[in-house]
Image (tube, grey):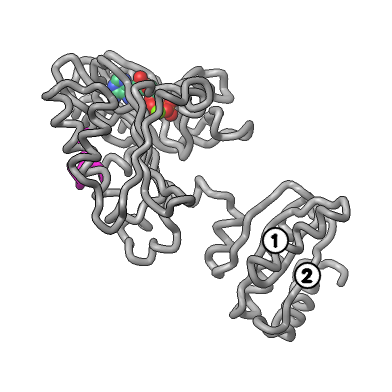
Amino acid sequence: MNIHEYQAKELFDKFAVPSPQGKVAGTPEEAEAAAKAIGSDTLVIKAQVHAGGRGKGAFKNGFQGGVHLIKSTAAARDIAAKMLGETLVTKQTGEDGKLVSKVMVADAVDISHEYYLAILLDRETSRPVIVASTEGGMDIEEVAEKTPEKIIREFINPLIGIQPFEIRKITAGLGFGKEEGKQFGKLLRNLYRLFIECDCSMVEINPLVTTPDGQVLALDAKFGFDDNALYRHPEIVAYRDTDEEDPREVAASEYDLNYIGLDGNIACLVNGAGLAMATMDIIKHHGGDPANFLDVGGSVTREGAIEAFRIILSDDKVKGVLVNIFGGIAKCDTIAEALIAAAKEVGFQV
Ligand code: ADP
Ligand code: MG
């Protein structure tokens, strides 16, 4: 699960990770009121979508940029009017873009330098890894490719947590002076605590900045949470914005179906993730293209199975459905009944 930047800022505040003051707005008037409440001479207004690259993105209505520097409260209203209800396309949204239904107005800060800081789960070592670079603000993949030596990686033992020597190593690697180093150390320790306590799969701050008056601040935030741990975080589930998700995946999650939409035209309805993957491989092997991954699990109900058919058949690209059920874990009669019921309801030939 992902969350918006303005929601991430609430978590930053809770865990004492410093970031500029900001307020969310859903209308141009609210954006103006937010700008007034913050009361700074210079502000930024930022489109809230689950994707990065907003600064360099463009709206389908021709308006350029999902992040703007503004110098008056009236400008907050005017720019919010150009963003709200419009579709923003960035490098990370795909060409369909994302509808902007909220903007965040935040205090603009003077930037001395932009850094990159992230905590991710490393699958090879099964450990959290801290990734940091002095080359923040830009495409980190490009930095990794062209100047890999500029990326610092520190693997953390999850049992003992982040240690002072590890923080010192990263602080030195980024070349912070004494005062900034102290602030950065505190920020990193708090960010690590946030990562662990909220069961994150990733936290990315790009950019993390220093200011001429010596502050260290997080200017952007991208979060991912481990879906399997969400049951113990109702406060994070409350941040879920289903408008940002594939509507087919949202419907599937209501029935505990593991569904991932793909681009082909042969839908699959399978039980067990391994069998689902093998089924997709077989389709590919014979020159076809799967339209989805769908694992209905072992304890699927009749209603769940009908919903599964409804979801896969709502995809216009689907020309046929391959049902591959292993009878050892799901009741085949449940699936068969659902197949007949769905055929009647949705109107297809079995
Ligand atoms: P994205 O990564 O989606 O483009 P960011 O939040 O990183 O969005 O914003 C893009 C750029 O805008 C940042 O790299 C930074 O230079 C600038 N920026 C963002 N927030 C602020 C802020 N509060 N004050 C000053 N500049 C900002
Ligand atoms: Mg960014």
Q: Secondary structure at mark 1?
A: helix
The region drawn magenta spans: 11-18
Q: In the image, is the residue at mark 2 within 8 Å of ligand 1 by its beta carbon?
A: no
In the rendered structure, which amino acid carries the disc numbered 1?
A: Met
Q: Which residue was labeled with disc 2?
A: 323
Relative to 332, is 40 on the left or the right? left
Marks 1 and 2, Cα distance to the nearest angstrom?
Answer: 13 Å
Tell me the residue that label 1 is attached to: 277
Q: Is residue 333 above or below residue 165?
A: below
Residue 35 location in percent, x, y?
25, 25
241 displayed left or right of 38:
right
Quadrant for residue 188, please give it: top left
In front here: 252 or 135? 135
Kind of residue indicated by mark 2: Val
Q: Position of residue 120 (x, y in %)?
A: 40, 45
Query: In the rendered structure, does residue 57 fall within the stretch colored magenta?
Result: no
Tell me if residue 331 comes above or below residue 186 in the rendering: below
- Pinpoint residue 42: horizontal percent, then vertical percent: 24, 16
Residue 202: which quarter of the image? top left
